[in-house]
Image: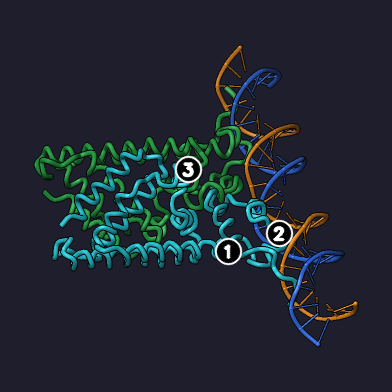
Chain colours: A green, B cyan, C blue, D orange
Amino acid sequence: MGRPRKFDEEQVLRAARDEFWKNGYAATSMDDLMKATGLGKGSLYGAFGDKHQLFLKVLGSYAHETADGVCDAVAGGERAIDVLRGFFTSEPSDDGPVALRRGCFLANSSTELATRDPEVTGCARATYQAVEDCFTNAVARAVAEGDLPADTNPRELGRLLLAIQQGLQFLLKTEMTPEALREIGAATVDRLLKS
Amino acid sequence: MGRPRKFDEEQVLRAARDEFWKNGYAATSMDDLMKATGLGKGSLYGAFGDKHQLFLKVLGSYAHETADGVCDAVAGGERAIDVLRGFFTSEPSDDGPVALRRGCFLANSSTELATRDPEVTGCARATYQAVEDCFTNAVARAVAEGDLPADTNPRELGRLLLAIQQGLQFLLKTEMTPEALREIGAATVDRLLKS
DNA sequence: CACGTTCCGGACCGTTTGGTCAAGAACGCG
DNA sequence: CGCGTTCTTGACCAAACGGTCCGGAACGTG
């Protein structure tokens, strides 16, 4: 009973995510969020509490999507080695130069808040642990499928790949040329993902 | 002539740097900066213009110090390979866990502002280009010294090392365990810095 | 159709923000 | 010592901030 909500919670979270993603947590005002979501102040506070809680909700959903995405990518695919190589071969200009240079929303948020906000740190830690596990599993599978040397330590290589991927994401934001980025990806494939 | 300044500009820039470093650009108020530097509002504005200009000055000095530091480290040392290995072997808890988890000030600033502030982007690009060049030179020297395979592409490996180093810096902030971080460094040495 | 309940819009609040300004203090110079 | 110049201090400002609250609108239910 009572008056039903006029908005779709998922859509609102999407809009808020875009806004936080664009400018970061501190530089995003409630006014920005109201304009982006189309909601009034009362609705926003009534539905999500306050700015910080809304942010955590947005960040959590993003983190889950990301982890699930990586997990699915790794689970699918005929050969694990192809999936792994794909992570470092994909064209760095898929989404256009602007959108891409925003980087990973979770990485941005961690950089801005991890030292002060334990909940953000926890979210980041859990998510990157999950991604690390995915990479590790994929490496192990690639070894089992004969596409990587039998003496490969899956955890070690998985972690190294995670570091490279994060490094790539970061360098993207520094306007490193696509050629240079591609070269790093290619070098990763050549040097670490060969049998 | 005129009244002489009561403060040392370098010390003020240091204090301001610490403050920006701790909380980022947007979350640092002029009030914080006044308390940290001990200067009154008028002095700060009189000497540096406004918040943004002060920040750029602070960031520029940090970037130069960083680039010079890497450059010097690479220039010195008997064998280039030892310098390179040193970058990935050094104990990740040198400065204590808190200070370290702040990460690189330039990287943090790029993440927060690079999409919106061309001057920050430019500073980041120039600095990381310089670091990349340092790595590349070190790799070339290591090849010449017979510590890396003769067919090594110095630019390619230099860039890859840069990506790994940035990835490590980032993962540090996500509270990845020191063991895991050390393992990544060790893996880098084992897999990429062996003859 | 009346009622209870929930939600919406936006006026409103105290605080904090980045930035200005004027009055006076501290020098170097003549 | 008096003058011009520069620096310091802190009061002050308009705007923006996050957050609260209330009158009315929009339902489900009886």
Is B54 rendered above or below residue A16?
below
* Residue at 61% across, 65% down: B9
Amino acid bearing label 3? Val
Is A50 rendered above or below residue B20?
above
At which x and y percent is residue B191? 19, 51
- The image quadrant that residue A43 belongs to is top right
Q: Which residue is mark 1?
A: B10
Question: Does the residue at mark 1 contact the one at mark 2 (Cβ under 8 Å)?
Answer: no
Q: Which residue is mark 2?
A: B41
- The image quadrant that residue B87 belongs to is bottom left
Gap in angstroms between the C-alphas marked 3 and 1: 24 Å
Mark 2 surroundings: few (<14), some (14-19) or many (≥20) residues within 10 A: few
Looking at the image, is mark 3 or mark 2 nearer the viewer? 3
Q: Is residue A71 left or right of residue A151?
A: right
Q: Chain of mark 3?
A: B
Gap in angstroms between the C-alphas marked 3 and 2: 30 Å
* Residue at 69% across, 67% down: B5
Amino acid bearing label 2? Lys
Q: Are marks 3 and 1 on the same chain?
A: yes
Q: Earlier in the sequence, mark 3 or mark 1?
A: 1
Amino acid bearing label 1? Glu
Q: Chain of mark 2?
A: B
- What's the mark number on residue A192? none
Q: Which residue is mark 3?
A: B98
At which x and y percent is residue B182? 30, 44
Q: Earlier in the sequence, mark 1 or mark 2?
A: 1
Label 1: element kind: helix
- The image quadrant that residue C15 belongs to is top right
* Residue at 34% across, 50% down: B167
B45 or D4: nearer the viewer:
D4
Q: Quadrant of the N terminus of chain A?
A: top right
